[in-house]
Image (cartoon, rainbow, N blue to C red):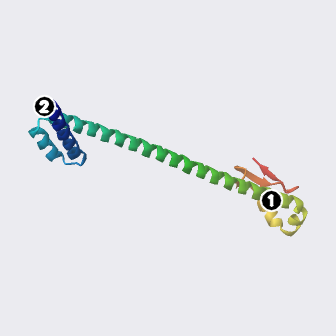
Amino acid sequence: MEEADQAKHERMISALNAMIDSGHLDEARTFAAANGASAHFQERVQANVIHDQEQRRQEMARDAEARRANDAADQARREQAMQDQQAKFAQIDADQEKFRKEHWTEIKQQHPEEVLHDQFPTFNRARSKWCSVNKDDGSTVCQ
């Protein structure tokens, strides 16, 4: 007789678990009360709550990690773009200075007003300084 009772109890617990797992909590509560399994019902519901909370905590942690990774990648892209832009400024500055030095005599003769203007300091983005052009050789002079 014990085996039959045990098998009946296991079927009842299995049916109760199926109701809980499918989300029919009111039906499962009533079924558990009618079959003397309210303690099992409460344990399963509490275990599900704890499981759901842990899943939410893990999802939040994954989301936070993904946000941190995305933020870091965005920051790296911004820094790379700034470095690329700075390299372009430096190349342009070097090319301009090289041209000025190679053609300084001609520039002074053909564009004296520009030579005069270039002797006033302007902000040189490539060097991050205030610079002007040396009137003797066309080189860049920074303060």
Residue 110 falls left or right of residue 4: right
83 or 120, nearer to the observer: 83
The image shows residue 122 at horizontal and vertical percentages of 71, 55
Q: Amino acid at mark 1?
A: Asp
Q: Which residue is mark 1?
A: 95
Q: Is residue 99 above or below residue 53?
A: below
Dot placed on the residue nearer the N-terminal end, 2 or 1: 2
Q: Which residue is mark 2?
A: 1
- Residue plotted at (61% across, 49% down): 79
Q: Residue furthest right?
A: 105
The image shows residue 138 at horizontal and vertical percentages of 85, 57
> Which of the two marks, 2 or 1, is nearer to us in this view?
2
Q: Residue furthest bottom?
A: 110
- Regarding residue 100, the answer to whether it shows in the image is yes
Q: Amino acid at mark 2?
A: Met
Secondary structure beneath disc 2? loop
Q: Is residue 114 above or below residue 17?
A: below
- Regarding residue 121, the answer to whether it shows in the image is no
Secondary structure beneath disc 1? helix
The image shows residue 115 at horizontal and vertical percentages of 81, 62
User: How many labels, in total?
Assistant: 2
137 or 126, nearer to the observer: 126
Q: Residue 119 has which mark? A: none
Residue 57 picture quarter = top left
